[in-house]
Image (tube, helix red, strand yellow):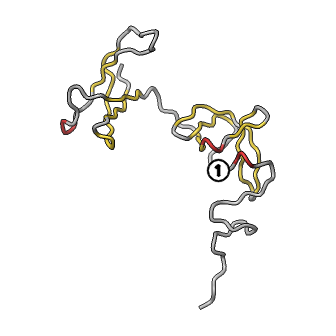
Amino acid sequence: MGLPARITVDAYPNETFTGTISRMSPILDPSTRAAEVEIIIPNRGSLLKAGMFVRAAIIIRNIESLAVPRESVVTRSSRNVVFLIEDDKARLAEVKIGVSQQGKIQILEGLQPGQEVVAAGAQFLNEGDTVRRPGQQPGRPGLPQGGGRRNPS
């Protein structure tokens, strides 16, 4: 009771409504694991109409945590690992993962805020491989595509 909910309606694909759970059925259907829930939604502009089908996501709790692209986490010898970028080299770091949602995966242990991880191609890397950032020229660490030299004018 009182938990916030985020509601979307097919009729308004670019709109999100928020509401609050006002009542919940004490009975859960064991075959579908569903229960009836009533959500009070402020109907701004009278957009919502009786009989509309909605999807509701109940926000149980917000957790601040580190997350990386799903492609960054690879399995090596039955361990979940990411490749950190240190001095243009790939360094293997074992991580403990949490939930995966919308292309991101939660990192519970093994990574600190601000550490740079390989976002694409991690499955092809080994410890110590040279890593190039997007736009960086091969063989010229740290210089963006296009050089670093200027012609005097």
User: Where residue 110 sits: x, y (%)?
Assistant: 70, 38
Q: Give the vertical position of 75 relative to 125 (above or below).
A: above
Residue drawn at x 30%, y 20% as measured from the top left: 38
Give the farthest residue toward the left.
46
Residue drawn at x 70%, y 37% as measured from the top left: 95
Residue drawn at x 63%, y 83% as measured from the top left: 150
User: Where residue 132 sits: x, y (%)?
Assistant: 70, 60
How many numbered badges does the structure rendering display? 1
Using residue 99 as the reference point, say whether residue 1 is left or right of it. Answer: left
Front position in the image: 32 or 112? 32
Query: Would you identify the image quadrant in which residue 86 lies?
Result: bottom right
Q: Give the vertical position of 133 relative to 23 (above or below).
A: below
Residue drawn at x 38%, y 14% as measured from the top left: 35
How many C-alpha atoms fall within 10 Å of the one at disc 1: few (<14), some, or many (≥20)? few
Is the N terminus in the top left, top right, bottom left or bottom right quadrant? Answer: top left
Is the C terminus in the top left, top right, bottom left or bottom right quadrant? Answer: bottom right
Please state which amino acid type lies under the numbered disc 1.
Answer: Ala
User: Where residue 107 sits: x, y (%)?
Assistant: 63, 37
Using residue 114 as the reference point, say whether residue 21 is left or right of it. Answer: left
Q: Give the vertical position of 3 relative to 110 (above or below).
A: above
The residue where tag 1 is placed is: 120
Query: Would you identify the image quadrant in which residue 87 lies?
Result: bottom right
Using residue 87 as the reference point, say whether residue 2 is left or right of it. Answer: left
Front position in the image: 68 or 121? 121
What SS does tag 1 mark?
A: loop
